[in-house]
Image (spheres, rainbow, N blue to C red):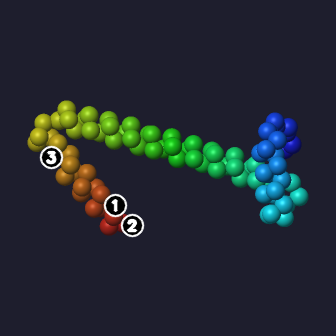
Amino acid sequence: MKTTIQIPDEIWKKLNIEAAERQQKGFSGIVTEAIEYYFAQKERAQALASRRKRAQLARQMFASLSQEEATEELETLQNRRRQWHARS
């Protein structure tokens, strides 16, 4: 799909140089690559934030358990991890 975007002159010059070095006719491929990279990084950051949020919630939940309940939950988790690794 074609579209028009505003690119500062200095970046436009760098894009043209990069395209020439890659022996490409234009710089659409470079722009597409940069946008894909941007969204991949954003997705990774969101996944990391989600993992951190889950870890924080888990810590809060474990803090609300008695020592006996926490020990039991930890043993259950460790058993599940061993079973999962055994299947891999």
Estimate the x, y position of residue 22 in percent, counting from the top left. 80, 63
Residue at position x 17%, y 42% from top? Answer: 70
Q: Residues within 10 Å of mark 3 (few under 14, many from 20)?
A: few
**Nearest to N terminus: mark 2 or mark 3:** 3
Indicate the quadrant where residue 25 lies.
bottom right
Q: Do the CB atoms of the residues marked 1 and 3 lie less than 8 Å apart?
A: no
Type of amino acid under label 1 = Trp
Estimate the x, y position of residue 43 in percent, counting from the top left. 56, 44
Give the residue pinned by disc 2: 88
Asked if residue 27 shows in the view, the reply is no
Give the residue pinned by disc 3: 71
Give the Cα separation between the discs numbered 1 and 2: 7 Å
Give the residue pinned by disc 1: 84
Above-or-below relation of 63 to 33: above
77 lies left or right of 28: left
Identify the element where label 3 is drawn.
Answer: helix
Q: Of 39 and 17, which appears nearest the observer?
A: 17
